[in-house]
Structure formats: structure tokens, C-alpha cells
Image (cartoon, rainbow, N blue to C red):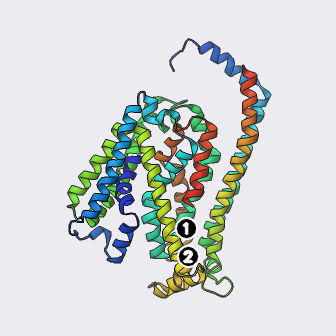
Amino acid sequence: MAESPNANIHAVAHEHIRNNPKFQELVSKRRAFAWLLSAIMLTIYFGFILLIAYGKTFLGQSLSGGVTTVGFPIGVAVILSAIVLTGIYVRRANTEFDELNRQILEEAR
Amino acid sequence: MSITKFALAAALAIGGTLAATAAYAAGADLGNVEKQATNWHAIVMFAIFVGGTLGITYWAARKNKTAADFYAAGGGITGLQNGLAIAGDYMSAASFLGISALVYGSGFDGLIFSVGWLVGWPIILFLIAERLRNLGKFTFADVASYRLAQGPVRIFAASGALIVVIFYLIGQMVGAGQLIKLLFGLDYIFAVIVVGALMMVYVTFGGMTATTWVQIIKACLLLGGATFIALGVLSHFGFSFEALFAKAIEVHPKKAAIMAPGSLVTNPVDAISLGLTLMFGTAGLPHILMRFFTVPNAKEARKPPASSVTSTS
């Protein structure tokens, strides 16, 4: 890392931000939220994979008597869940997290 | 790394649907394609596409002034543009040829691949995307070596990248060569050299700006083409999935077995190992990860996964 003439000013600003309780709130809230959503996604996905591994006959049985099997709507549901979870994250990040971020930067001035 | 994707992109974008249907109708095996008579229509289309993308490269080369411009498009790509570019990176070989062929060959098991690839995206978004952007580096090796010993980390990253890229590149170049041979009637070796030279020109002169725009164009072409085919097929069956599946079972040599898992994934260990590979495969793709360095801030870094999740699905 090259030492810039502003290194000291930056170090002070960094220290200031790190000690801001709002920054700690942002970090812990976002971390918890990200891991929660990841856990939901992984559970859904590996549930699907385990179903493929151990529940072949279940996935292969007919849905409402026709040729369409139970597996297809389940596969589509996993895809939709990925879209929904992404939407949930982006929505909260764009409002709550970005607002906190803005306040932190404001207070660091 | 997007270089490799261009190999198929260039060939694919021209013919798009044509390429796939031609190969399919002729019953041709891609590994053993017969050289076709020189097809001037296809060559003219190809020349127009190459000319257009070279124009973009020229424009990008004039804009590139610093290292940040070259590697990360100066951080000036918007989230939506980047999302389309990632979708382009991701869809070239994978969705258009690979998944179509897997679903055609093994039915339900092909669906496992599309699901597995897709769920990598939310994980990237939740855990990786914003952090990468916030560090303000150019490549993944920069990030990995940020708090560690630079030398060994970079050597390891470079070796890993090169080994993966070599395999990636061989597959893509063979595919591109075969496709161009099939479409244009060029000699295989000549086709591979032309494609390889074009890729190098794009990336060397245009950097990330040019590759991004070429990917965006490709993504739009592929999304448009795939939607058109899907709607066409569905309208043929009166928008009834039941009728579509019934016909598929009737004409497929494996009959009803294509509607259930098992033809490709035969035991639980296979299923779990494949599931892990597919998901972490997406999350670790270097040309995807480096795209997060091209956006101006974390908010924009959030958009690409969001938009590419929507478009790739």
C-alpha cells in the first residue's frame, strides 16, 4: 500500500466511521440478513437435490393424472424462489441499508 | 475470461436459432460435422456482426486511458448494463446449447442443471458482490491477496485461473470452430484461427468496456431468440404444457423416463456432488466475479445479479 499524503486524514475518518454505532448496526444487520437469505436459498436448493437423490419416485409421479410429473412444478418453484429471495434482498438493501450508509457518511464529514 | 465466451458468442449471435436448428435438423453430431458448401449469406451476416463489434472495440479503445478504464471500464458500467452483460457471459454456451442439449438428451435431469446454475446467483449477491466492489480492486487475485501474502496468493490464483481457462477455452474454441465450419463451410483450422484472433483483438484493444458491450448485445439477441422459440413452440401446442410434454414423450426414445430424474443422475452421491458443483461453479466463475468491479458503487453492484437472475431464468 503506497502512503498517500492524505493517509492520516483517511485513517482518522475510518476510525470515526468504525466507532459510529450506526456503522456497527449496518454491518451486523446486513450480515445477519445476508446469511439468513443464503440459508433459506441453500435449504430450498439442497432440499430439491436431496429429493432428486432419494425421492425419485415422488418426483416422477403424475401430477393430476396427466403426463406432467410432480418434479416440474417443484423445479420451477426453486427457480422462482431464487428470484423472490433476490428481490427481497435488493429491496431492503436499497432502502434500509443504503439509508443507514448515507447517514454514516454524513456523520463522518 | 470473457474472451472464451466470445468464441461461441460470435458464431452463435449470427445464426442464433439457425445454428441450433440447422445442426439439429441435419442430425449432425457437433464433434463430427461435415464441411458445408460455402454459405455466403451466413458469411455476410458474420462479417456484419464482426464489423459492428470491432467498431465498439475501436470506440472503447479510444475511451480507455487508465488501468481502471481497461480492467473495470472505469467503474462506469451501470447495474442494468452489467446484469445484461453477465447474462450474456452466462447464457452463451450454457443455456443455448448446453442446457438445450441436456434437456433434449435426458429430460428432467437437464432441468437440474438450470436450477443449479441459477441458485448460485442469489448466493453471490448476498455474500460476495457488494464486498468485492467496496474493496475497489480490479481482479479477484487483488482481493484475495489484500490481507495475505501477495506472492503465493497471486501465483496460486494465476495457476488456478490458467488451468480452468485452458479447459474452458479448448471446449469453446472447438465448439466455435465446428459451428463456423458447419455454418460457413470454412476449414476447421482456419475457423479456429479466425475466432481466436478476433477474441484477442476485442480484449486487447477494447478491454472491459468493449467486452461488456459485446456481451450486452449478445444477451439481447439470445434473450430475444430464446423467447421467440419458446413462444413459437408453446403456441404450436396451444400453450398447453401437458400437450407439449405428451408429444415429447411420444417422440423421445426414452419415452416417459424423461419426465423423472434418473437418466443422467443415477445415484444419490451423483446428485449431491452435481448439486454442489453447479451452485459453487456459478459463484466462482472468474469472468462473473470481475464484473462487480466495473460498477460505480455497491448499489449498482446489487443490480447485476438481480437483473441476470431475472433474465437467465
The label shown at residue B230 is none
Res B261 label: 2
Q: Name the quadrant containing residue A68.
A: bottom right
Residue B269 in sight here? no
Q: Secondary structure at mark 1?
A: helix
Q: Which is nearer the eye, A83 or A49?
A: A83
From where the camera sits, is residue A84 visible?
yes
Q: Tell me residue A55's x, y (percent).
A: 64, 75
| Residues behind callouts 2 and 1 on a single chain | yes
> What residue appears at the point 54 percent right and 14 percent down from the top-left corner?
A4
Amino acid found under the numbered disc labelled 2: Pro
Disc on the earlier residue, 2 or 1: 1
Residue at image point 62% right, 47% down: B125
Please say if A60 is above or below B10: below
Task: Quadrant for the C terminus of chain B, please.
Answer: bottom right
For disc 2, the chain is B
Residue B191's place in the image compared with B83, above or below, is below
* Direction from residue B22 to residue B83 in the image, left or right: right
Q: Residues within 10 Å of mark 2 (few under 14, many from 20)?
A: many
Local packing at callout 1 (Cα closer than 10 Å; few below 14, some 14-19, many 20+) is many
Distance from Cα at disc 2 to Cα at disc 1: 9 Å
Q: Is residue A47 above or below residue B67?
A: below
Mark 2 in CB contact with mark 1 (< 8 angstroms): yes
Determine whether, in the image, residue B34 is placed left or right of residue B61.
left
Element on which disc 2 rests: loop
The chain identifier of the residue carrying mark 1 reads B
Give percent across and percent down for residue A90. 68, 47
Residue A44 point in image, percent of width and height: 67, 62
Q: Nearer the viewer, residue B15 or B203?
A: B15
Amino acid carrying mark 1 in the image? Ile
Residue at numbered disc 1: B112
